[in-house]
Amino acid sequence: MRPSKSQTKDLMPNTCHRLFAQTLAILLAIALWATACSGAEDPAPAATNGPDTPVDEPGTSAAETPTDSPYATEQLGFDDVDFTIPDPSDDTVLDPAADVPVYATAGDLIDAGVASGAFTEIEGVRAVVSVVMSELSVESVPGLDLVPSRDHPGILDRAERLLQDQSVDAAQRADLARLTAFFFADDPRSGATATDSGTDDEEGAFGEVRLVSLAQSTTTVCQLNEALVFGATETVLCYKEFSNDEGDTVLVADTLDASDQSDRIFELIELARSGYLQLAGSTLPTVRILLSTDLSPPDAESAAGGSAAHVLGHSTNPCRVAVFADTSIYSSVEFDYVLTHELFHCVQNTWGGSLEASPTVQEGGATYFSQRLLDTCATGLLTAYGPRLDASTINTSVLDTGYASWYFWRFLDDHGHLGPNAISAVHQQVAAGDPLDQALLAALDEPAEVLNEFYVRMVGPGLACGLQGAAFLGGPPDITAPGPVDLASEFWVGTRYLLTYVQRKHFEQRRSGVEPMGMAEFGSVADASAWTVLEPDIRTRCNELELWAVVVTAPNPTTSAVQTIDVDTADDADCDPCLLGSWTIELATMSKYFEGFAPDGANVSLDGDWTLEFTADPSTMSDTRNLAVTVSLDDLGIGGPATQVVGSGSGSFSSDGSNFSVSGFTDSTQASVGGWSSPWSTSTSGGATPYTCDETTLTFQMPGDDLTISATRQPVLPKGEPYFG
């Protein structure tokens, strides 16, 4: 709809409207005169940890077994052991409330106690396992309740080593064997009678051990609370036993739906046996699985009331797996993940060697292969590791991220860098004794570029299961002037910065060197197309700083590199440097605008070129026109030859990012038609015109109903090489 003439008059203070209208008035007068004479046709944290996660050791419980239980088995006890660790070193982290040392794991606590002489290693291990098995209160071991998580990595491996150490007190070994009977006895059902102490057999192996009494049955195994179940109870807990043709055995607590659970477990075993052979090239051995209940109070932060699962460190035939959990987890997808995670540990055990020194392979690998097998993101136990990975890799190597590293292995798989068989081969090399970093370097083509892509995806388009990172290092000082911007980078660490470009500037920049780098405006990091190797042209407005995410990676593991962005220019600009440069007016939008001033029924056609140029310091707008203007009045049968219009103008401009105005704009134009020509000059100043501007398009909002004039940037702004090719 065209604006009425009265509307047009009322809105004349609009700068662009006045500027263009004055030009048009003269053009129309000439064009209509020529037509009449001829008669011819004429615009974050802080990372937080997620819920408790499956671990490879049982979870702790503060409950105690009643000493007057009729089923209680005699044990050594700890009456003569003081577990208080004296005089922590100056660098030990202390709990501010209790002034007690805080250790990362129970193993660290044991090592500190042994080093201080407070207790022996087997006393410490027995104490932790006793707490795990609810025979000893967690308060009996100062500091154990402050260990950050419920898992106690390596405790069973320590127990296994101590049981085989002939120099360790036999009575203490016997008690430790009793506590770990399910894992270390050849057959947990074989020891119907317990002895008071262990004896060494002739071959030097640990012989008779103090096993928990088991009531034998053809279909049911009954177990006192001392060994196979967490939490305190005065009742006998029974397990139904099931087996399949492959020799796998499942023991399910009577408190669970035994038949349904056993069917489900055998289905998961079958899936893992075929799936892990295909994915990892390794066969799942026969397994003996125990499902029990965690009778300790549920952890308030746990998604499913708490769970703990573990595998005997080197058991292979059968591989023994135990899951202790709140009953709710057995009916959730979490359980499928927990069990298949542990089953992959059984696969890892078949490789020989040891993965204890590399949790990134042992735990992150089991998590990756489990997730790959199930092909689901439905479990919170998986996604809980995302914030941990994001936060820790700011200063920590991705090779030291344990469970959370499953995202890294899945990234390698998802983006064609290493498939699951190749990942398994790397993990088996580590089990055989090769350092993980060397195994990865040998397996990856262009490892620096691969690592850079991993961190770009983590803070940008995202990783598996929707992980979107948000952790960045503080960048160098605000970028205000030309000069080098130095960014330190590490190889295995995700070095990612937020750079601040100050407002009201036009920056031009390049980078020194060819080290891997990715860059995107912070507000657009989730858009893969927004990432470039380096953005060469950055324009900031007057009312906002501009943040850019930059991810840099050292070229190799032995170099801590400093990568440099060379800022060549940092020119002062108008409030909106987006305007700066050359623009070509889209003549179709100008024709529609001009028709609003022509007589009713007139059609205005423009051919040729009309350009605008905006420069800074001082802020100047200029335009040049070389046009053929044709006006036709179809209703009157009037049309004429085109009027040739050549002209230019310039003046000062100002903008605030949303409104634009011109002052002192002078224009000189000459129009000619049919051998007749007429020069003229005008001068214009006016009020604000709304506009929008982006990398490619400048749009002025003119008076009237949705009436706009558009222009296209010429040439287009220089863009960096796309990061994702």
Image (spheres, helix red, strand yellow):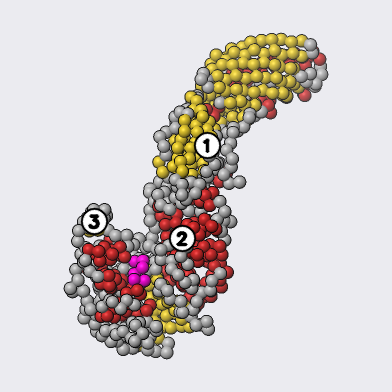
Examine the rendered structure and indicate whether residue 362 appears above or below residue 445.
Answer: below
Q: Between marks 2 and 3, how big is the CA–CA gap?
A: 31 Å
Membership of 2 in magenta stretch: no
Q: Identify which residue is drawn at 58% across, 42% down.
A: 722
User: x, y percentage for residue 451?
Assistant: 51, 51
Q: Secondary structure at mark 3?
A: loop
Q: Classify mark 2: residues with Cα within 10 Å, few (<14), some (14-19) or many (20+).
A: some
Q: Report if the CB atoms under discs 2 and 3 are less than 8 Å apart.
A: no
Q: Amino acid at mark 2?
A: Pro
Visible in this render: residue 325?
A: no
Determine which residue is flagged by label 2: 435
**Three-letter residue code for mark 3:** Ser
Amino acid type indicated by mark 1: Arg
Image quarter (top left, top right, bottom left or bottom right) of the N terminus: top right
Q: Can you identify the residue that label 1 sits on?
A: 511
Tell which circle, 2 or 1, labels the residue nearer the N-terminal end. 2
Above or below, 240 relative to 698: below
Alpha carbon distance from label 2 to label 1: 34 Å
| Residue span colored magenta | 152-158
Disc 2 or 3, which lies upstream in sequence?
Answer: 3
